[in-house]
Image (cartoon, coloured by chain):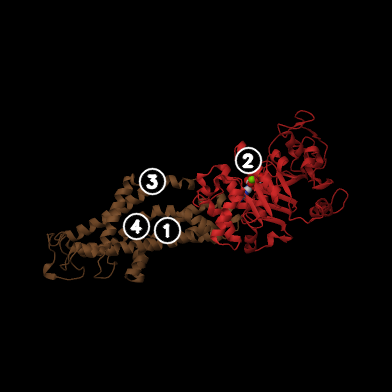
Chain colours: A brown, B red
């Protein structure tokens, strides 16, 4: 734990992420306003003591929308990454352990998925599924599956031939048990490292999709949606896009720093995975 | 089919099994390996011929030593007894009977009930035989929980007993360590404890001491010796050290290029080795002098398993090889009571040992 705190990336990245989580959790305490109340006469107010980050085109408080938006954006990103981890590691471990035809089939499907730019894949899925909070986690999560699939498969291929897997088999463990009890715990630390990077990607994807109009439905605020709403007034009222954009950038930076830091930190512990 | 028939006859043409039964006090073998052949296809249509027709029996309570140079198929043979050789890619032929039932025809589910419960294995590399992310106590408990209907608490107690049985110092403290916190010698003891957990019928020890340094080797061998005295299980001791065999095993099988060249009781092998290869192996032991100093040294290397010689697999290195050896493969036959050899000229090179 001590040495973890001596890694600057982890400390800075972790602080940013913890702050964002706190903002999301305590959103109602951080603002006197409601995120949906329209007050048209009050629109496009520049930052003032009343509205620290100004108001948007409907006269809603931008800071209020951002703190509530943190809830949605973080929720969507976490759920999307969770979906990607569950499916990615499940199929990755199976492909890496069973090899042969199973591996070839799974790997080809993943290759096809990776042939699409992630955003394009999200757009296609989004267009098919329609926009809702649940669907959004799906179409942000699916393009992240290959990342976790490849990590899980790689680690599994690496350790699958190790003597201790053979030893586990030699005491009568089933294949399922070997995958769950012996391989998964070895895969998880690697997933953990990729997780942060995946989160950064998911935040960014949410923002991009929101910007393109495939975000959560109105009036629920998400960071992508806030940027989208402000884009027409980017020059006359730059605070809406500016502040929400800054939160997106900061959060992505936080996750990426954390991911890099964790990779460095966990590396010595992952040594046994290198042959 | 012809070879099968010949194999089962001795020099007098009598069926071999009869003698074997007699030799073993009329007990039926616990494990019978019959004409086992294993090859691994490689690129270009060729194959690595790892095992080429092995016939071997293991009797209840017996300790069998298996000796042979690196790459002669020892590990592959005994891994296949537990069906741990993945097939495909490997192509496996022959039969392995355990308690009269053919292992090759068992379902995966039946096989899982034998692994860890009836037959267990200790692997060559103690450093990588334990899962690095799992506490060792839990790895011991796993065997018990898989095969016996006991609670986790009872399994943990049993694990502790096993640790004491294999003489792990500070057993309570070590139980919940991770493997990297233990030395190689201790890890091998943990592996032995794991193998003993369900009181198996057969323990396959694949070079359990090769990776350890000399003093630790001696300690682990002492432990195995003690366990062998105190339990009724059959132990197969795989090694390339005849010294280990002399200490631990009652009977020896000499492996070469995926075949058994000679099989005899341990004292008999040392007193009267019949196969030129065995004679060579014996004269390699530094402490023991043969009648003539360096009477016989094996030159050359083991044959390429992708391109095995015709006839006797040993003929390219054999000093007394004849045209017959090059042409015709000698089959394993009974030479005397408890002594089997696969050579056209058994005993022509003598290597009587004077200690
Ligand atoms: N999975 C595999 N694929 C291809 N060839 C293999 C495989 N496993 C073993 N072999 C080959 O089979 C032969 C016998 O190997 P095996 O491990 O049984 O030797 P060994 O007698 O145990 O040797 P050692 O004393 O070094 O452990 C070797 O030539 C080896 O290269
Ligand atoms: Mg071996």
In front: B236, or A46? B236
Q: Which residue is mark 1?
A: A146
Horizontal relation, residue B20 to residue B220: left or right: right
Mark 1 burial class by Cα count in 10 Å: few <14, some 14-19, many 20+:
many
Residue A264 disc label: 3
Q: Position of residue B14 (x, y in %)?
A: 87, 53
Q: Which residue is mark 4?
A: A199
Mark 2 burial class by Cα count in 10 Å: few <14, some 14-19, many 20+:
some
Mark 3 burial class by Cα count in 10 Å: few <14, some 14-19, many 20+:
some
Q: Position of residue B47 (x, y in %)?
A: 65, 49
Chain bearing tag 4 is A
Same-chain check, marks 3 and 4: yes
Structural distance between the alpha carbons of marks 2 and 3: 40 Å
Mark closer to the observer (3, 1): 3
Q: Position of residue B180 (x, y in %)?
A: 50, 45
Q: Is the C terminus of chain B in the top left, top right, bottom left or bottom right quadrant?
A: top right
In front: B324, or B214? B214
SS for dot 3: helix
Residue B219 disc label: 2
Residue B320 visible somewhere in the drawing: yes
Chain bearing tag 2 is B
Q: Is mark 1 within 8 Å of ligand 1?
A: no
Structural distance between the alpha carbons of marks 3 and 1: 23 Å
Nearer-N-terminus badge (3/4): 4
Structural distance between the alpha carbons of marks 4 and 1: 14 Å
Horizontal relation, residue B335 to residue B206: left or right: right
Mark closer to the observer (1, 2): 2
Horizontal relation, residue A93 to residue B306: left or right: left
């Amino acid at each position: 734990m001590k040495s973890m705190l001596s890694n600057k990336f982890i400390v800075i990245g972790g602080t940013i992420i913890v702050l964002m989580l706190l903002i999301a959790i305590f959103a109602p305490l951080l603002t006197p306003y409601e995120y949906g109340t329209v007050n048209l006469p009050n629109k496009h107010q520049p930052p003032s003591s009343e509205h620290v980050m100004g108001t948007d085109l409907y006269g809603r408080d931008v800071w209020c929308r951002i703190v509530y938006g943190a809830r949605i954006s973080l929720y969507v990103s976490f759920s999307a990454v969770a979906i990607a981890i569950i499916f990615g590691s499940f199929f990755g471990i199976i492909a890496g352990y069973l090899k042969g035809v199973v591996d070839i089939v799974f790997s080809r499907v993943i290759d096809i998925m990776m042939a699409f730019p992630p955003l394009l894949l999200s757009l296609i899925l989004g267009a098919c599924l329609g926009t809702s909070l649940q669907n959004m986690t799906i179409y942000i999560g699916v393009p992240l599956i290959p990342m976790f699939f490849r990590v899980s498969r790689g680690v599994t291929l690496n350790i699958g031939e190790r003597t201790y897997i053979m030893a586990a088999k030699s005491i009568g463990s089933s294949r399922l048990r070997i995958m769950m009890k012996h391989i998964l715990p070895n895969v998880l630390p690697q997933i953990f490292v990729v997780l942060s990077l995946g989160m950064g990607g998911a935040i960014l994807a949410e923002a991009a999709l929101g910007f393109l109009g495939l975000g959560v439905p109105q009036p629920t605020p998400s960071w992508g949606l806030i940027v989208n709403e402000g884009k027409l007034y980017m020059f006359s009222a730059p605070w809406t896009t500016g502040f929400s954009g800054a939160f997106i950038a900061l959060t992505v930076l936080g996750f990426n720093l954390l991911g890099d830091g964790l990779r460095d930190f966990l590396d010595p512990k992952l040594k046994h995975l290198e042959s | 089919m012809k070879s099968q028939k010949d194999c089962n006859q001795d020099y007098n043409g009598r069926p071999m099994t009869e003698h074997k039964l007699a030799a073993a006090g009329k007990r039926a073998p616990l494990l019978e390996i019959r004409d086992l052949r294993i090859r691994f296809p490689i690129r270009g249509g060729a194959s690595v011929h790892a095992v080429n027709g092995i016939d071997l029996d293991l009797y209840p309570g017996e300790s069998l030593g298996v000796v042979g140079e690196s790459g002669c198929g020892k590990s592959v043979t005994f891994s296949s007894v537990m069906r741990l050789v993945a097939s495909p890619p490997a192509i496996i032929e022959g039969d392995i009977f355990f308690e009269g039932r053919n292992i090759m025809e068992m379902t995966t589910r039946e096989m899982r009930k034998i692994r860890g419960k009836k037959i267990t294995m200790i692997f060559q590399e103690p450093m990588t035989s334990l899962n690095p992310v799992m506490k060792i106590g839990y790895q011991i408990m796993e065997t018990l929980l898989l095969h016996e209907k006991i609670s986790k608490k009872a399994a943990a107690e049993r694990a502790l007993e096993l640790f004491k049985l294999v003489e792990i110092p500070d057993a309570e403290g070590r139980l919940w360590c991770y493997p990297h916190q233990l030395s190689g010698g201790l890890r091998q003891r943990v592996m032995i404890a794991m193998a003993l957990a369900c009181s198996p019928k057969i323990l396959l020890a694949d070079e359990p001491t090769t990776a350890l340094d000399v003093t630790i080797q001696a300690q682990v061998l002492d432990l195995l010796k003690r366990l062998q005295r105190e339990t009724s299980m059959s132990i197969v001791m795989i090694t390339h050290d005849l010294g280990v065999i002399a200490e631990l095993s009652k009977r020896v099988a000499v492996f070469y290029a995926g075949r058994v060249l000679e099989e005899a009781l341990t004292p008999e092998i040392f007193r009267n080795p019949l196969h030129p290869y065995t004679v060579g192996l014996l004269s390699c032991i530094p402490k023991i002098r043969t009648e003539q100093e360096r009477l016989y040294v094996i030159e050359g290397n083991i044959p390429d398993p992708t391109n095995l010689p015709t006839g006797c697999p040993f003929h390219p290195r054999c000093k007394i090889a004849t045209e017959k050896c090059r042409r015709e493969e000698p089959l394993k036959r009974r030479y005397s009571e408890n002594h089997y050899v696969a050579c056209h000229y058994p005993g022509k090179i003598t290597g009587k040992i004077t200690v």
